[in-house]
Amino acid sequence: MGFLGNALLAGSAIAVACGLIGWFVVLRREVFAGDALSHVAFTGALAAAAAGLDLRVGLFVASVAVALLLAVLGGVSPSARGSAEGTARADDVSIGVVFVWVLGLGVLFLDLFNAGGAGADGTIVARTLFGSIFGLSAGAARLAAVLAAATVLALGAIARPLLFASIDAPLAAAGGVPVRGLGVAFLVLLGVVAAEATQAVGALLLLGLLAAPAGAAHRLTANPYRGMALAAGIALASMWVGLALGYWIGALPPGSAVILVAGAVYGLTMV
Amino acid sequence: MRQLLAYRFMVNALEAAGVVAVMAAVVGRFMVLRRETFAGHTLAAMSFPGAAAAALAGVPLAFGYFVFCVAGAASIAAAPDAGGGQQRAAAIGTVQAVAFALGFVLLSVYGGVLESLETLLFGSILGVTSAQVLTLALVAVCVLAFLASVGRPLFFASVDGSLADASRVPVRALATAFLVVLGLAVAATAQITGVLLVFALLVAPAGIARELTPRIGLGLALSVVLGLLIAWVGLGLSYFTNYAPGFFVTSIALALFAAARGLRSL
């Protein structure tokens, strides 16, 4: 299996995970939280680089830690809009402030990394920000696929109560659904998916894979399960078409191609 | 203190940070009021494809920013308001990712160096020239003049859109105009100070002011003071420790925000 096979394996698994969780992200109006979680993966990767650790350790630790932080903020947000008290949805100002702080930390790590010369890998910034899916090893691709499958299964396990809690939080809470716990679990899963997808399409681009297929699916159908399937399908198709374009056109980075295709599909549903 | 002002580059940096802080605090207060923080961050991203496209086409940077900011603001404003903001948020997220993707494609076609990418994203305020300070000041004056001229109707439309609409305030036109101005303000300054610093100064002072007072006039004054404080103290700390200003600016912002929120929930 060559680099293209590795890219297809990891990319397909990541696309399905992003499409599915993205459908919930859009439903729950947590796109900005997704934006923050995807960008902080950058800080995690740089921290790991500065400390000389595996990048993936930094990616996962940073994303999950910030997911928990956002969940805590959601619990204390007095001005959270349109959500019942304590649904673990942070308001956008707290997200923004935390988010810039984590990026500020990333800059600090970049300084430390550049000063220390640890690893001496000059392409780390570009790779983290824009992904390097054609550079995945067979082992990394298999691991990515297994992790993506695990997050899809975990999401499937909480899908029904999460759907209920997302659509009508007060009613769900009255019905005994642990709304706040689900909100936290969802953000943590989103953090895992973000860390995962950073390897494929990069910290700056993966928001497109969360938002565009899901936005298109929400426009095309109101039925939840059909919508989830559609979001996953559009994400998968964008991944395949993007990878193919990136493979054939030398100057086109594959991660960017995937996002441009997904964005075009979303744009088409608008007209 | 005297040591801080002994070098030309430091004076330029403090001046640039001061200008950006004042402008961002005022624009940011409206942005927070209108719950458009996410849109603000996305429009800040427009400076990346804008710069890359301008470099590729060989036109002035300002032209690239202008085209991408207007295109981005128009795409966001055109998104349907269905589903209680769901489509809006999805559209903003897509616009941002597509902008970054496009910027990266243009950059790889151009074959530019990635150092400029880092500078664009995280800024190089310590390398600002006197001419750039002047440019910043011009942008700030234009932005503040726009907000001063539409401040009252914009405030009305932001607080109660339907009532403003009923009183014949052009709510939709104001919304689009505000997005364009927000984008231009951020993109023009991001080139000089970095997206990170601008966005921090846009959201934090306004967010802290909102925690402390619901009044708009007092809130505006408070955000300007807070913005200047955060920017200058951050730069000063950066000078004495030799670490990136972005880290200190964002850390002070977070600490003050947490303190303000703690104070409010007492």
Image (tube, helix red, strand yellow):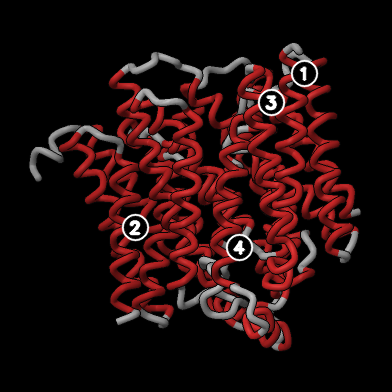
Please give the chain letter of the residue carrying mark 1: A
Please give the chain letter of the residue carrying mark 4: B
Percent coordinates x, y for residue B259 in the rendering: 28, 68
Label 3, residues with CA under 10 Å away: few <14, some 14-19, many ≥20: many
Label 4, residues with CA under 10 Å away: few <14, some 14-19, many ≥20: many
- Disc 3: which residue: B105
Looking at the image, tell me whether mark 4 or mark 3 is earlier in sequence order.
3
**SS at mark 4 in the image:** helix
- Disc 2: which residue: B254
- To the question of a shared chain for discs 1 and 2, the answer is no
Which numbered disc covers residue A221?
A: none
Q: Is residue A95 left or right of residue B55?
A: left
Dot in front, 1 or 2: 1
Q: Is residue A171 left or right of residue B27?
A: right
- To the question of a shared chain for discs 2 and 3, the answer is yes
Percent coordinates x, y for residue A57 in the rendering: 46, 33
Q: CA distance from mark 2 to mark 3?
A: 34 Å
